[in-house]
Image (cartoon, rainbow, N blue to C red):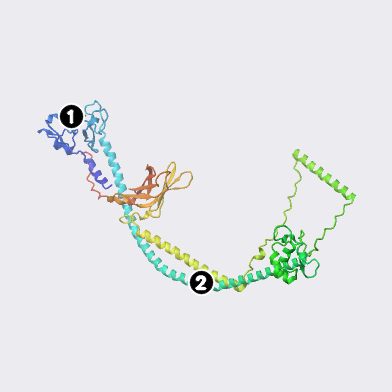
Amino acid sequence: MLLLPSLLLLLPYCSAVEVKRPRGVSLSNHHFYDESKPFTCLDGSATIPFDQVNDDYCDCKDGSDEPGTAACPNGSFHCANAGYKPLYIPSSRVNDGVCDCCDGTDEYNSGIVCENTCKEKGRKERETLQQMAEVTREGFRLKKILIEDWKKAREEKQKKLVELQEGKKSLEDQVDTLRMVKEEAEKPEKEAKEQHRKLWEEQQAASKAQKEQERAASAFQELDDNVDGMVSLTELQTHPELDTDGDMALSEGEAQALLGGDSQADATAFYDRVWAAIRDKYRSEVLPTEPPAPTADLTEPKEEQPPPVPSPPLEEVEEEEEEAEEEEEEEEEEAEAEVQGEQPKERLPPQVPPQPASPTEEDKMPPYDEETQALIDAAQEARDKFEEAEKSLREMEESIRNLEQEISFDFGPNGEFAYLYSQCYELTTNEYVYRLCPFKLVSQKPKHGGSPTSLGTWGSWAGPEHDKFSAMKYEQGTGCWQGPNRSTTVRLLCGKETVVTSTTEPSRCEYLMELTTPAACPEPPPEPPADGDHDEL
C-alpha cells in the first residue's frame, strides 16, 4: 500500500524516453545489445555477430539473442506499453495472432492489427490508484483518531482500575465484617433450632411410646378372653400368625416361649416381655368399618359370628326384578339411539373416593415459636447482607480482571485496533452467516436456522515478521468430521469502514476471512505539488 502513491506519480512517465534497442529488449537491458560489437549471450554461453540477433534462429541457450521473435522456446519478449505498465511475455506468444501487449508490438509480423490501448489502461489504472490513495489517506486520518481515542480510553480504564482496586480493599473488609456478624447470628439460631427439634423429637418419641402402649393394651384385652386380667397359653394360641417355626400353628411350647417360660402374663409383664416379641406379627381382631364411625368400639368379642341375613319378602323380590328389566330396556334404547345417530344420555363419571390424609402430616415438625423465629429471621438477614456483599466483591474482581486484560492486550503498535475489542461483524452469504468478534471468536451459522459452529477462538497476531499486525489467527474451533479442528486466518486490509468483505475455505477446515479497517491503513507519503498534467509525455 505504501507504493501506491509512488506508482501513481511514476505511471505517466513510463517509457517516456525512447532509447534505440532491438525489438523485445527492455530499457534496463539495452546496454547488452550494442550494434557495434558482437553479442554475448546473457548467460555467457556463446558470442555471436550482432546481425544474428532477432534473425529468427536461436543461437543462445537462454534465448537472449531472440528477444523479438518466437525462435527460442525459453525466450522473453518485452512489451514497452508506453503510457501503461511494461510487461514480459513468453516469446512463443510473439506473432501468434493474439494481442498480448497493449501497444500491439508483439504482433508486428502476424498480419493482425492490434489497437494501442495503453493510454486508456493507464488512465483507468491512475483512477484506481487515485481511489486507493484516497482510501489510504482517509483511512489513515481515521486511524489517527482511533489511536487518540484509545489513549484517552486507556487512561480512563487505568484510572477506573485504580478506583476498583481501592474499592476492593474496602469491600473485602466489609465482607469480613459481615461474615463475622453472620456467624455470630447463626450460633443462637442453630442452638434454638436444635432445641426446638430436640423437644419435638422427644414429643414424637413420647407419643410413639404412648401409641405403642395403647396398641399393646388393646392386644392384651383381645387376648384376655376370660377377662381375668391374664393372658394364658391357651389364649395366646388362638393367634396362629405368631407361629415361630413356620408350620402355621402356635404350639404350646412356642406360646410358653413367647410368655418367657411362664404359663400366663399380666398386663405389665405382657408389655415388658411379650409384646416386643409379637408386635410385628400380631393381627388385631378388630376390623375397621367403612366409613369409620367415630363412636365405634375399638374392640369386639372374639370369634363373634355375624347375624344371619333374613330373606327378603316375595314382593320385594318381584319389585327388584321389575327394576332390573326397566334398566335393561333403558340400556337397549340408548344403544338404538346411538345407532340412529342420537346422542345418548350423558352418564356421570364414576365417583372417586376421597384421598386419605397424608400419613406424614403428623410427622412434620411444628412451626417455630416466636423467640426462635426471631433468631432465624435475624440470622437470615445477616446471611442476605453477607451474600450481597460477597456477590458485589466477585463482580468487582471480575471487572478488575477484565480491565487488566484489556489494558495489557496487544492492540497494535499504537493501540489502533483496540476499538475492535468489544465489537462483532457479520457477513451473510447464500448459505451461511459468518460472525467475527475480533480478539474473541469466529463462528458460522446456517442462514436459515441452526446452531452456530465455532471456526476458532483468538490465538495470536499472524502476519509476517515485518508486518505482524496484518493478520489474526483463530484456532481450536469445532472439529471437522474425521479431520482437524476448524481455524480461521483474518487478513486486515486498509479501508475507510470496518467490514467483513469475504470468507473462503481454501483448505478443508481452514478458513480465510478479510476485514477492512482504518486501523490497517499505512501512513501515505506527502502529496506532491500540482505541476500540471504530464499525460502528453
Q: Position of residue 243 (x, y in %)?
A: 72, 60
What is the count of numbered marks? 2
Residue in the picture at 37% in, 47% down: 488
Q: Position of residue 438 (x, y in %)?
A: 38, 52
Identify the mark nearer the N-term, 2 or 1. Answer: 1
Within the image, what quadrant is residue 163 found in? bottom left
Q: Position of residue 196 (x, y in %)?
A: 61, 71
Q: Residue furthest top?
A: 111
Q: Residues within 10 Å of mark 1 (few under 14, many from 20)?
A: many
| Label 1 sits on residue | 58
- Residue type, mark 2 in image: Glu
Residue 451 vs residue 437, the one in the foreground: 451
| Label 2 sits on residue | 183
Spatial CA span between label 2 and label 1: 102 Å
SS category of the residue bearing label 1: loop
- Relative to 25, is 343 on the left or the right? right
Which labelled disc corresponds to residue 254? none
Residue 326 at least partly seen: yes
Q: Residue furthest front?
A: 253
SS category of the residue bearing label 2: helix
Residue 298 at least partly seen: no
Residue 111 vs residue 446, the one in the foreground: 446
